[in-house]
Amino acid sequence: MLFDRAHPALAGALAARGYTEPTPVQEAVLQEGAAGRDLLVSAQTGSGKTVAYGLALAEDLLGPAERLPRPGAPLALVVAPTRELAMQVQGELAWLYDAAGARIASCIGGMDGRAEARALASGCHVVVGTPGRLCDHLRRGVLDLTALRAVVLDEADEMLDLGFREELEQLLNAAPAARRTLLFSATIAREIASLARQFQRDALRIDTLGRNRPHADIAYRAIRVAPHETLHAVVNVLRYEEAPTALVFCATREAVRHLHASLLERGFTSVALSGELSQAERTRALQALREGLARVCVATDVAARGLDLPALDLVVHADLPGDRDILLHRSGRTGRAGRKGCSVLVVPFNRRRRAEELFSTAGVEASWAEAPDADSIRARDTDRLLQDAALNAPPAADEQELIRRLLEGRTAEQVATALIRLHRARLPAPEEMSPVAAGERRGPRPADAAPRAWFSLSVGRRDRADPKWLVPLICRLGGVEKRDIGAIRIFDRETKFEIDSAFAARFAAIVPQDGEEVRVAPCDPAPASTAPSRRPSRFPEARGRGRARAA
Protein backbone atom coordinates (compact mmCIF):
# COMPACT_ATOMS: atom_id res chain seq x y z
CA MET A 1 0.00 0.00 0.00
CA LEU A 2 1.20 3.48 -0.86
CA PHE A 3 -0.14 6.65 0.77
CA ASP A 4 -3.30 6.49 -1.36
CA ARG A 5 -5.52 6.74 1.72
CA ALA A 6 -3.74 9.81 3.07
CA HIS A 7 -5.55 13.16 2.83
CA PRO A 8 -4.82 14.83 -0.56
CA ALA A 9 -3.66 18.01 1.20
CA LEU A 10 -0.75 16.08 2.73
CA ALA A 11 0.30 14.03 -0.31
CA GLY A 12 2.68 16.68 -1.66
CA ALA A 13 4.47 17.05 1.66
CA LEU A 14 4.94 13.28 1.92
CA ALA A 15 6.32 13.05 -1.61
CA ALA A 16 8.67 15.99 -1.05
CA ARG A 17 10.11 14.23 2.01
CA GLY A 18 10.66 10.99 0.11
CA TYR A 19 7.84 9.02 1.75
CA THR A 20 6.87 6.29 -0.71
CA GLU A 21 5.52 3.50 1.49
CA PRO A 22 3.92 3.81 4.93
CA THR A 23 5.46 2.16 7.96
CA PRO A 24 3.28 -0.44 9.73
CA VAL A 25 1.89 2.08 12.22
CA GLN A 26 1.16 4.62 9.46
CA GLU A 27 -0.62 1.96 7.41
CA ALA A 28 -2.63 0.88 10.47
CA VAL A 29 -4.01 4.35 11.25
CA LEU A 30 -4.96 4.86 7.57
CA GLN A 31 -7.06 1.69 7.33
CA GLU A 32 -10.76 2.21 6.71
CA GLY A 33 -11.82 0.93 10.12
CA ALA A 34 -9.67 3.53 11.92
CA ALA A 35 -11.29 6.63 10.39
CA GLY A 36 -12.98 8.79 13.01
CA ARG A 37 -12.36 6.35 15.87
CA ASP A 38 -10.40 6.66 19.08
CA LEU A 39 -7.11 4.78 18.75
CA LEU A 40 -5.05 2.90 21.33
CA VAL A 41 -1.73 2.29 19.60
CA SER A 42 1.40 0.49 20.78
CA ALA A 43 4.32 1.22 18.46
CA GLN A 44 8.08 1.11 18.71
CA THR A 45 9.89 4.39 19.26
CA GLY A 46 11.22 5.59 15.90
CA SER A 47 8.53 3.73 13.89
CA GLY A 48 7.11 6.86 12.27
CA LYS A 49 4.28 7.35 14.75
CA THR A 50 4.42 11.18 14.67
CA VAL A 51 3.64 11.16 10.96
CA ALA A 52 1.10 8.40 11.69
CA TYR A 53 -1.03 10.50 14.01
CA GLY A 54 -0.44 13.53 11.79
CA LEU A 55 -2.11 11.55 8.99
CA ALA A 56 -4.85 10.31 11.33
CA LEU A 57 -5.72 13.88 12.35
CA ALA A 58 -6.21 15.12 8.78
CA GLU A 59 -9.94 14.32 8.58
CA ASP A 60 -10.57 16.02 11.94
CA LEU A 61 -8.63 19.14 10.99
CA LEU A 62 -9.39 19.49 7.27
CA GLY A 63 -12.48 17.46 6.47
CA PRO A 64 -12.90 17.61 2.67
CA ALA A 65 -11.03 20.96 2.40
CA GLU A 66 -7.52 21.38 1.04
CA ARG A 67 -6.62 24.17 3.48
CA LEU A 68 -7.31 24.82 7.11
CA PRO A 69 -9.65 27.61 8.21
CA ARG A 70 -8.42 30.85 9.74
CA PRO A 71 -6.51 30.08 12.97
CA GLY A 72 -8.37 30.54 16.22
CA ALA A 73 -8.84 28.26 19.22
CA PRO A 74 -6.82 25.06 18.61
CA LEU A 75 -8.49 22.15 16.85
CA ALA A 76 -6.00 19.50 17.99
CA LEU A 77 -3.77 19.03 21.03
CA VAL A 78 -0.66 16.82 21.15
CA VAL A 79 0.83 16.08 24.58
CA ALA A 80 4.40 14.74 24.83
CA PRO A 81 6.50 13.80 27.89
CA THR A 82 9.65 15.86 27.24
CA ARG A 83 10.74 19.14 25.72
CA GLU A 84 12.81 17.43 23.02
CA LEU A 85 9.98 15.20 21.85
CA ALA A 86 7.50 18.09 21.87
CA MET A 87 9.84 20.19 19.71
CA GLN A 88 10.40 17.28 17.34
CA VAL A 89 6.63 16.75 17.03
CA GLN A 90 6.09 20.42 16.30
CA GLY A 91 8.69 20.26 13.52
CA GLU A 92 7.20 17.09 11.98
CA LEU A 93 3.64 18.44 11.96
CA ALA A 94 4.85 21.78 10.58
CA TRP A 95 6.21 20.27 7.34
CA LEU A 96 3.38 17.75 7.05
CA TYR A 97 0.69 20.48 7.24
CA ASP A 98 2.63 23.33 5.65
CA ALA A 99 0.73 23.19 2.34
CA ALA A 100 -2.56 23.13 4.27
CA GLY A 101 -1.68 26.44 5.92
CA ALA A 102 -1.38 25.07 9.46
CA ARG A 103 -0.18 27.17 12.36
CA ILE A 104 1.43 24.96 15.02
CA ALA A 105 1.94 26.47 18.48
CA SER A 106 4.05 25.01 21.26
CA CYS A 107 3.73 25.12 25.05
CA ILE A 108 6.91 23.60 26.43
CA GLY A 109 8.41 23.78 29.91
CA GLY A 110 11.64 25.78 30.04
CA MET A 111 10.63 28.04 27.14
CA ASP A 112 9.33 31.63 27.17
CA GLY A 113 5.80 31.35 28.57
CA ARG A 114 4.85 34.89 27.56
CA ALA A 115 5.77 34.26 23.93
CA GLU A 116 3.68 31.08 24.03
CA ALA A 117 0.72 33.00 25.46
CA ARG A 118 0.96 35.55 22.64
CA ALA A 119 1.06 32.75 20.04
CA LEU A 120 -2.06 31.15 21.54
CA ALA A 121 -3.87 34.49 21.68
CA SER A 122 -3.15 35.14 17.99
CA GLY A 123 -4.72 31.81 17.04
CA CYS A 124 -3.45 28.40 15.91
CA HIS A 125 -4.68 25.07 14.58
CA VAL A 126 -2.59 22.62 16.63
CA VAL A 127 -0.94 22.95 20.03
CA VAL A 128 1.99 20.69 20.96
CA GLY A 129 3.24 20.75 24.52
CA THR A 130 4.42 19.11 27.72
CA PRO A 131 1.84 18.32 30.43
CA GLY A 132 3.01 20.78 33.06
CA ARG A 133 3.25 23.84 30.80
CA LEU A 134 -0.07 23.05 29.08
CA CYS A 135 -1.80 22.89 32.47
CA ASP A 136 -0.17 26.20 33.48
CA HIS A 137 -1.65 27.92 30.41
CA LEU A 138 -4.99 26.19 30.99
CA ARG A 139 -5.21 27.41 34.61
CA ARG A 140 -4.42 30.98 33.53
CA GLY A 141 -7.10 30.93 30.86
CA VAL A 142 -4.56 31.33 28.06
CA LEU A 143 -5.18 27.88 26.53
CA ASP A 144 -8.72 27.39 25.22
CA LEU A 145 -9.58 23.73 24.62
CA THR A 146 -13.31 24.17 23.88
CA ALA A 147 -12.89 23.82 20.09
CA LEU A 148 -10.72 20.68 20.19
CA ARG A 149 -11.62 17.94 17.75
CA ALA A 150 -8.82 15.58 18.73
CA VAL A 151 -6.26 14.94 21.49
CA VAL A 152 -3.07 12.89 21.04
CA LEU A 153 -1.12 11.50 23.98
CA ASP A 154 2.32 10.63 22.62
CA GLU A 155 4.45 8.17 24.62
CA ALA A 156 1.75 7.98 27.27
CA ASP A 157 3.66 5.32 29.23
CA GLU A 158 6.55 7.71 29.79
CA MET A 159 4.22 10.50 30.90
CA LEU A 160 2.71 8.21 33.51
CA ASP A 161 6.18 7.03 34.58
CA LEU A 162 7.15 10.67 35.08
CA GLY A 163 4.11 11.26 37.31
CA PHE A 164 1.94 13.30 34.91
CA ARG A 165 -1.33 11.39 35.36
CA GLU A 166 -3.01 14.27 37.20
CA GLU A 167 -2.03 16.74 34.46
CA LEU A 168 -3.24 14.39 31.70
CA GLU A 169 -6.59 13.96 33.42
CA GLN A 170 -6.90 17.73 33.83
CA LEU A 171 -6.29 18.31 30.11
CA LEU A 172 -8.61 15.50 28.97
CA ASN A 173 -11.40 16.63 31.30
CA ALA A 174 -11.13 20.18 29.90
CA ALA A 175 -11.48 18.98 26.29
CA PRO A 176 -14.93 18.49 24.67
CA ALA A 177 -16.46 15.07 25.31
CA ALA A 178 -17.06 14.53 21.59
CA ARG A 179 -13.38 14.80 20.65
CA ARG A 180 -11.26 11.91 19.33
CA THR A 181 -8.57 10.59 21.67
CA LEU A 182 -5.48 8.97 20.15
CA LEU A 183 -3.23 7.29 22.71
CA PHE A 184 0.25 6.16 21.60
CA SER A 185 2.46 4.11 23.92
CA ALA A 186 5.41 1.73 23.61
CA THR A 187 3.66 -0.69 25.96
CA ILE A 188 0.05 -1.00 27.11
CA ALA A 189 0.57 -1.52 30.83
CA ARG A 190 -2.19 -1.53 33.45
CA GLU A 191 -2.10 2.25 33.98
CA ILE A 192 -2.31 2.90 30.23
CA ALA A 193 -5.27 0.56 29.90
CA SER A 194 -6.97 2.32 32.83
CA LEU A 195 -6.43 5.73 31.21
CA ALA A 196 -7.84 4.42 27.94
CA ARG A 197 -10.98 3.03 29.60
CA GLN A 198 -11.54 6.33 31.37
CA PHE A 199 -11.11 8.70 28.44
CA GLN A 200 -11.64 6.74 25.22
CA ARG A 201 -14.82 5.48 23.58
CA ASP A 202 -14.77 2.15 21.72
CA ALA A 203 -11.09 2.60 20.90
CA LEU A 204 -9.52 0.62 18.07
CA ARG A 205 -6.54 -1.33 19.44
CA ILE A 206 -3.52 -1.23 17.12
CA ASP A 207 -0.41 -3.24 17.95
CA THR A 208 2.16 -2.94 15.18
CA LEU A 209 4.84 -4.97 16.96
CA GLY A 210 3.08 -7.80 18.69
CA ARG A 211 3.22 -8.31 22.42
CA ASN A 212 6.71 -8.75 23.90
CA ARG A 213 8.31 -8.68 20.45
CA PRO A 214 11.66 -6.88 20.21
CA HIS A 215 12.71 -4.52 17.45
CA ALA A 216 13.82 -6.58 14.43
CA ASP A 217 16.47 -4.07 13.28
CA ILE A 218 18.47 -4.18 16.53
CA ALA A 219 21.25 -6.70 17.18
CA TYR A 220 21.77 -7.48 20.88
CA ARG A 221 25.19 -8.33 22.30
CA ALA A 222 26.24 -9.12 25.85
CA ILE A 223 29.82 -8.39 26.90
CA ARG A 224 31.18 -10.40 29.84
CA VAL A 225 33.49 -8.40 32.13
CA ALA A 226 35.00 -8.50 35.58
CA PRO A 227 32.92 -6.28 37.92
CA HIS A 228 35.68 -3.69 38.33
CA GLU A 229 36.26 -3.32 34.56
CA THR A 230 32.92 -1.93 33.41
CA LEU A 231 34.49 1.42 32.44
CA HIS A 232 37.26 -0.28 30.45
CA ALA A 233 34.68 -2.39 28.64
CA VAL A 234 32.60 0.68 27.70
CA VAL A 235 35.73 2.40 26.37
CA ASN A 236 36.70 -0.61 24.27
CA VAL A 237 33.18 -1.13 22.89
CA LEU A 238 33.03 2.52 21.82
CA ARG A 239 36.48 2.27 20.25
CA TYR A 240 35.78 -1.02 18.50
CA GLU A 241 32.48 0.11 16.99
CA GLU A 242 33.50 3.73 16.24
CA ALA A 243 29.80 4.56 15.71
CA PRO A 244 29.11 8.11 14.46
CA THR A 245 26.76 8.55 17.43
CA ALA A 246 26.52 6.34 20.52
CA LEU A 247 24.26 6.53 23.57
CA VAL A 248 25.56 5.09 26.87
CA PHE A 249 23.08 4.46 29.69
CA CYS A 250 23.92 4.66 33.39
CA ALA A 251 21.65 3.99 36.36
CA THR A 252 22.30 7.20 38.33
CA ARG A 253 23.31 10.83 37.87
CA GLU A 254 26.53 10.19 39.77
CA ALA A 255 27.39 7.32 37.42
CA VAL A 256 26.72 9.61 34.44
CA ARG A 257 29.06 12.27 35.85
CA HIS A 258 31.82 9.75 36.54
CA LEU A 259 31.60 7.98 33.17
CA HIS A 260 31.33 11.25 31.23
CA ALA A 261 34.42 12.65 32.98
CA SER A 262 36.31 9.40 32.33
CA LEU A 263 35.48 9.45 28.62
CA LEU A 264 36.51 13.09 28.27
CA GLU A 265 39.78 12.32 30.05
CA ARG A 266 40.45 9.53 27.53
CA GLY A 267 39.82 11.81 24.55
CA PHE A 268 36.24 10.97 23.56
CA THR A 269 34.07 13.83 22.34
CA SER A 270 31.11 13.27 24.65
CA VAL A 271 28.22 15.03 26.36
CA ALA A 272 26.18 14.12 29.43
CA LEU A 273 22.42 14.23 29.96
CA SER A 274 20.91 14.03 33.43
CA GLY A 275 18.09 15.67 35.34
CA GLU A 276 20.37 18.25 36.92
CA LEU A 277 21.05 20.06 33.61
CA SER A 278 19.25 23.26 32.70
CA GLN A 279 17.28 23.36 29.47
CA ALA A 280 19.95 25.54 27.85
CA GLU A 281 22.69 23.04 28.78
CA ARG A 282 20.58 20.16 27.53
CA THR A 283 19.88 21.92 24.23
CA ARG A 284 23.60 22.62 23.70
CA ALA A 285 24.46 18.98 24.39
CA LEU A 286 21.91 17.69 21.89
CA GLN A 287 22.99 20.24 19.31
CA ALA A 288 26.60 19.05 19.66
CA LEU A 289 25.45 15.48 18.96
CA ARG A 290 23.34 16.41 15.95
CA GLU A 291 26.11 18.54 14.45
CA GLY A 292 28.75 15.83 14.95
CA LEU A 293 30.75 17.86 17.47
CA ALA A 294 30.24 15.05 19.99
CA ARG A 295 29.98 11.34 19.25
CA VAL A 296 28.99 9.90 22.64
CA CYS A 297 26.08 10.80 24.90
CA VAL A 298 26.06 9.47 28.49
CA ALA A 299 22.58 9.60 30.03
CA THR A 300 20.19 8.29 32.66
CA ASP A 301 16.93 6.64 31.61
CA VAL A 302 14.87 9.66 32.67
CA ALA A 303 17.13 12.19 30.92
CA ALA A 304 17.01 10.21 27.64
CA ARG A 305 13.22 10.05 27.48
CA GLY A 306 11.89 11.62 24.33
CA LEU A 307 15.40 11.77 22.87
CA ASP A 308 15.51 11.27 19.11
CA LEU A 309 18.89 10.98 17.39
CA PRO A 310 18.23 9.78 13.82
CA ALA A 311 21.85 8.70 13.18
CA LEU A 312 22.20 6.73 16.42
CA ASP A 313 23.81 3.37 15.59
CA LEU A 314 24.97 2.12 19.01
CA VAL A 315 23.39 1.87 22.48
CA VAL A 316 25.61 0.73 25.36
CA HIS A 317 24.17 -0.29 28.73
CA ALA A 318 26.97 0.53 31.18
CA ASP A 319 24.55 -0.44 33.97
CA LEU A 320 22.05 -3.25 33.39
CA PRO A 321 18.45 -2.14 32.74
CA GLY A 322 16.03 -2.50 35.64
CA ASP A 323 13.51 -4.57 33.67
CA ARG A 324 12.56 -5.75 30.17
CA ASP A 325 10.66 -2.55 29.32
CA ILE A 326 13.68 -0.41 30.14
CA LEU A 327 15.88 -2.73 28.07
CA LEU A 328 13.61 -2.46 25.04
CA HIS A 329 13.04 1.27 25.45
CA ARG A 330 16.74 2.06 25.81
CA SER A 331 17.60 -0.15 22.86
CA GLY A 332 14.77 1.32 20.80
CA ARG A 333 16.70 4.57 20.51
CA THR A 334 18.65 2.88 17.72
CA GLY A 335 17.49 0.86 14.71
CA ARG A 336 15.03 3.52 13.55
CA ALA A 337 13.44 4.18 10.19
CA GLY A 338 14.94 1.10 8.56
CA ARG A 339 18.48 1.66 9.89
CA LYS A 340 20.28 -1.18 11.65
CA GLY A 341 21.31 -0.67 15.25
CA CYS A 342 23.33 -2.44 17.93
CA SER A 343 22.53 -2.70 21.64
CA VAL A 344 25.43 -3.82 23.85
CA LEU A 345 25.00 -4.81 27.49
CA VAL A 346 28.10 -4.71 29.68
CA VAL A 347 27.51 -7.64 32.04
CA PRO A 348 29.69 -8.23 35.15
CA PHE A 349 30.18 -11.98 35.39
CA ASN A 350 28.40 -12.06 38.76
CA ARG A 351 25.26 -10.61 37.11
CA ARG A 352 25.07 -12.90 34.10
CA ARG A 353 21.96 -14.66 35.38
CA ARG A 354 20.18 -11.29 35.72
CA ALA A 355 21.11 -10.39 32.12
CA GLU A 356 19.85 -13.75 30.84
CA GLU A 357 16.54 -13.16 32.65
CA LEU A 358 16.22 -9.76 30.95
CA PHE A 359 16.82 -11.25 27.52
CA SER A 360 14.35 -14.06 28.18
CA THR A 361 11.49 -11.85 29.39
CA ALA A 362 12.11 -9.37 26.55
CA GLY A 363 12.10 -12.12 23.91
CA VAL A 364 15.59 -11.08 22.82
CA GLU A 365 18.30 -13.36 21.45
CA ALA A 366 21.70 -11.96 22.36
CA SER A 367 25.18 -13.10 21.40
CA TRP A 368 27.69 -13.40 24.25
CA ALA A 369 31.35 -12.45 23.97
CA GLU A 370 34.21 -10.90 25.87
CA ALA A 371 34.92 -7.19 25.57
CA PRO A 372 37.06 -6.24 22.58
CA ASP A 373 40.72 -6.29 23.56
CA ALA A 374 43.36 -3.75 22.58
CA ASP A 375 44.76 -5.89 19.77
CA SER A 376 41.38 -6.38 18.07
CA ILE A 377 40.70 -2.65 18.32
CA ARG A 378 44.03 -1.79 16.72
CA ALA A 379 43.29 -4.28 13.95
CA ARG A 380 39.92 -2.59 13.37
CA ASP A 381 41.67 0.80 13.30
CA THR A 382 44.02 -0.50 10.60
CA ASP A 383 41.11 -1.78 8.50
CA ARG A 384 39.27 1.51 8.83
CA LEU A 385 42.34 3.47 7.81
CA LEU A 386 42.98 1.29 4.75
CA GLN A 387 39.33 1.58 3.69
CA ASP A 388 39.15 5.35 4.19
CA ALA A 389 37.84 6.96 1.02
CA ALA A 390 40.37 9.78 1.44
CA LEU A 391 43.19 7.39 0.44
CA ASN A 392 41.71 6.98 -3.02
CA ALA A 393 40.41 10.50 -3.56
CA PRO A 394 42.15 12.47 -6.35
CA PRO A 395 44.03 15.56 -5.15
CA ALA A 396 42.37 18.94 -5.53
CA ALA A 397 44.08 21.64 -7.55
CA ASP A 398 45.04 23.68 -4.48
CA GLU A 399 46.65 20.59 -2.88
CA GLN A 400 49.12 19.86 -5.68
CA GLU A 401 51.79 22.29 -4.47
CA LEU A 402 51.63 21.00 -0.89
CA ILE A 403 51.90 17.41 -2.15
CA ARG A 404 55.00 18.31 -4.14
CA ARG A 405 56.62 19.95 -1.12
CA LEU A 406 55.79 17.01 1.15
CA LEU A 407 57.42 14.55 -1.24
CA GLU A 408 60.59 16.65 -1.65
CA GLY A 409 63.32 14.89 0.30
CA ARG A 410 60.94 12.37 1.86
CA THR A 411 60.30 8.78 0.97
CA ALA A 412 56.81 7.31 0.57
CA GLU A 413 57.49 5.35 3.77
CA GLN A 414 58.11 8.54 5.75
CA VAL A 415 54.90 10.16 4.49
CA ALA A 416 52.92 6.98 5.25
CA THR A 417 54.43 6.85 8.74
CA ALA A 418 53.30 10.41 9.42
CA LEU A 419 49.82 9.58 8.16
CA ILE A 420 49.56 6.56 10.48
CA ARG A 421 50.77 8.55 13.49
CA LEU A 422 48.35 11.38 12.82
CA HIS A 423 45.51 8.87 12.46
CA ARG A 424 46.35 7.14 15.74
CA ALA A 425 46.90 10.38 17.65
CA ARG A 426 43.26 11.39 17.30
CA LEU A 427 41.98 8.07 18.65
CA PRO A 428 41.51 7.35 22.38
CA ALA A 429 43.77 4.56 23.55
CA PRO A 430 42.09 1.17 24.07
CA GLU A 431 42.09 -0.34 27.55
CA GLU A 432 43.83 -3.57 28.56
CA MET A 433 41.25 -6.06 29.86
CA SER A 434 41.68 -8.87 32.39
CA PRO A 435 40.75 -12.37 31.24
CA VAL A 436 37.07 -12.86 32.02
CA ALA A 437 37.68 -16.54 32.65
CA ALA A 438 38.95 -15.55 36.09
CA GLY A 439 35.43 -14.69 37.12
CA GLU A 440 33.26 -16.90 34.95
CA ARG A 441 31.26 -19.71 36.48
CA ARG A 442 33.26 -22.92 36.23
CA GLY A 443 32.86 -26.57 37.07
CA PRO A 444 34.03 -28.32 40.27
CA ARG A 445 37.58 -27.64 41.37
CA PRO A 446 39.79 -30.64 40.46
CA ALA A 447 41.68 -32.40 43.22
CA ASP A 448 45.04 -31.58 41.62
CA ALA A 449 44.23 -27.88 41.11
CA ALA A 450 46.93 -25.24 41.47
CA PRO A 451 47.97 -24.29 45.02
CA ARG A 452 46.35 -21.41 46.85
CA ALA A 453 47.79 -17.97 47.65
CA TRP A 454 47.23 -16.44 51.09
CA PHE A 455 45.86 -12.95 51.81
CA SER A 456 45.06 -11.09 55.01
CA LEU A 457 41.97 -9.01 55.69
CA SER A 458 42.11 -6.30 58.38
CA VAL A 459 39.15 -7.58 60.41
CA GLY A 460 39.23 -10.32 63.04
CA ARG A 461 37.48 -11.66 66.13
CA ARG A 462 37.39 -8.21 67.71
CA ASP A 463 35.23 -7.14 64.75
CA ARG A 464 32.97 -10.22 65.14
CA ALA A 465 34.38 -11.60 61.88
CA ASP A 466 32.34 -14.48 60.54
CA PRO A 467 32.64 -16.46 57.28
CA LYS A 468 28.94 -15.82 56.62
CA TRP A 469 29.71 -12.23 55.71
CA LEU A 470 33.44 -12.52 55.05
CA VAL A 471 32.96 -14.75 51.97
CA PRO A 472 30.55 -12.34 50.16
CA LEU A 473 32.81 -9.45 51.14
CA ILE A 474 35.92 -11.12 49.66
CA CYS A 475 34.02 -12.06 46.48
CA ARG A 476 32.84 -8.49 45.98
CA LEU A 477 36.14 -6.81 46.81
CA GLY A 478 38.24 -9.09 44.62
CA GLY A 479 35.87 -10.03 41.81
CA VAL A 480 36.04 -13.76 42.53
CA GLU A 481 33.52 -16.51 43.25
CA LYS A 482 32.95 -18.46 46.45
CA ARG A 483 34.60 -21.53 44.93
CA ASP A 484 37.85 -19.56 44.43
CA ILE A 485 38.20 -19.07 48.19
CA GLY A 486 39.90 -21.80 50.20
CA ALA A 487 40.49 -21.91 53.94
CA ILE A 488 39.59 -18.96 56.15
CA ARG A 489 41.52 -18.48 59.42
CA ILE A 490 40.12 -15.85 61.78
CA PHE A 491 42.56 -14.32 64.31
CA ASP A 492 42.17 -11.61 66.90
CA ARG A 493 42.95 -8.62 64.65
CA GLU A 494 43.00 -10.08 61.17
CA THR A 495 41.62 -12.83 58.97
CA LYS A 496 43.76 -14.90 56.63
CA PHE A 497 42.24 -16.67 53.64
CA GLU A 498 43.26 -18.59 50.53
CA ILE A 499 42.64 -17.60 46.92
CA ASP A 500 43.29 -19.84 43.94
CA SER A 501 46.83 -18.93 42.91
CA ALA A 502 45.77 -18.66 39.24
CA PHE A 503 43.89 -15.49 40.16
CA ALA A 504 46.12 -14.17 42.94
CA ALA A 505 47.85 -11.40 40.95
CA ARG A 506 44.57 -10.13 39.58
CA PHE A 507 42.94 -10.34 43.01
CA ALA A 508 45.75 -8.33 44.59
CA ALA A 509 45.38 -5.61 41.93
CA ILE A 510 41.65 -5.21 42.51
CA VAL A 511 41.14 -5.21 46.27
CA PRO A 512 41.55 -2.06 48.44
CA GLN A 513 45.05 -1.17 49.50
CA ASP A 514 46.48 0.85 52.40
CA GLY A 515 44.41 3.87 53.30
CA GLU A 516 41.11 2.01 52.95
CA GLU A 517 39.12 1.02 56.04
CA VAL A 518 39.30 -2.63 55.01
CA ARG A 519 42.80 -3.58 53.87
CA VAL A 520 43.68 -6.72 51.94
CA ALA A 521 47.27 -7.75 51.31
CA PRO A 522 49.26 -10.88 50.43
CA CYS A 523 50.56 -12.70 53.49
CA ASP A 524 52.30 -15.85 54.69
CA PRO A 525 50.18 -18.99 55.05
CA ALA A 526 48.20 -19.30 58.26
CA PRO A 527 49.18 -22.08 60.66
CA ALA A 528 47.27 -25.24 59.75
CA SER A 529 46.42 -25.82 63.39
CA THR A 530 44.26 -22.73 63.54
CA ALA A 531 40.80 -23.95 62.60
CA PRO A 532 38.57 -21.68 60.59
CA SER A 533 35.63 -20.24 62.47
CA ARG A 534 32.43 -21.47 60.82
CA ARG A 535 30.03 -20.71 63.68
CA PRO A 536 27.34 -18.09 63.02
CA SER A 537 27.97 -14.86 64.85
CA ARG A 538 26.03 -14.40 68.08
CA PHE A 539 25.91 -10.69 67.27
CA PRO A 540 23.73 -9.93 64.19
CA GLU A 541 25.00 -6.36 64.14
CA ALA A 542 28.49 -7.63 63.40
CA ARG A 543 27.47 -8.50 59.85
CA GLY A 544 26.26 -4.98 59.29
CA ARG A 545 29.53 -3.62 60.63
CA GLY A 546 31.48 -5.81 58.25
CA ARG A 547 29.48 -4.64 55.27
CA ALA A 548 29.87 -1.03 56.35
CA ARG A 549 33.61 -1.43 56.51
CA ALA A 550 33.64 -2.84 53.00
CA ALA A 551 31.50 -0.06 51.57
Image (spheres, grey):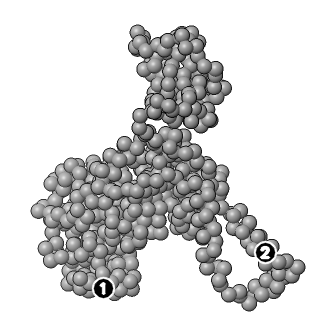
Around disc 2, counting alpha carbons within 10 Å, would you say few (fewer than 14), some (14 to 19), or many (20 or more)?
Answer: few
- Circle 2 sits on which residue? 413
Residue visible at 23% across and 51% down in the picture? 189
Q: Position of residue 523 (x, y in %)?
A: 64, 22
Q: Position of residue 78 (x, y in %)?
A: 31, 64
Left or right: 120, with 231 as reference point? left
Amino acid type, callout 2: Glu
The residue nearer to you, when weighing 109 against 347, is 347
In the figure, 216 relative to 393: above or below?
Answer: above
The residues bearing labels 1 and 2 have C-alpha atoms spaced at a distance of 58 Å
Residue visible at 53% across and 65% down in the picture? 243
Amino acid type, callout 1: Ala
Residue visible at 57% across and 45% down in the picture? 434
Around disc 1, counting alpha carbons within 10 Å, would you say few (fewer than 14), some (14 to 19), or many (20 or more)?
Answer: some
Residue visible at 26% across and 64% down in the picture? 209
Left or right: 244, with 300 as reference point? right
Q: Position of residue 340 (x, y in %)?
A: 41, 69
Q: Which numbered tag is attached to residue 11?
A: 1
In the figure, 110 relative to 8: above or below?
Answer: above
In the figure, 444 relative to 405: above or below?
Answer: above
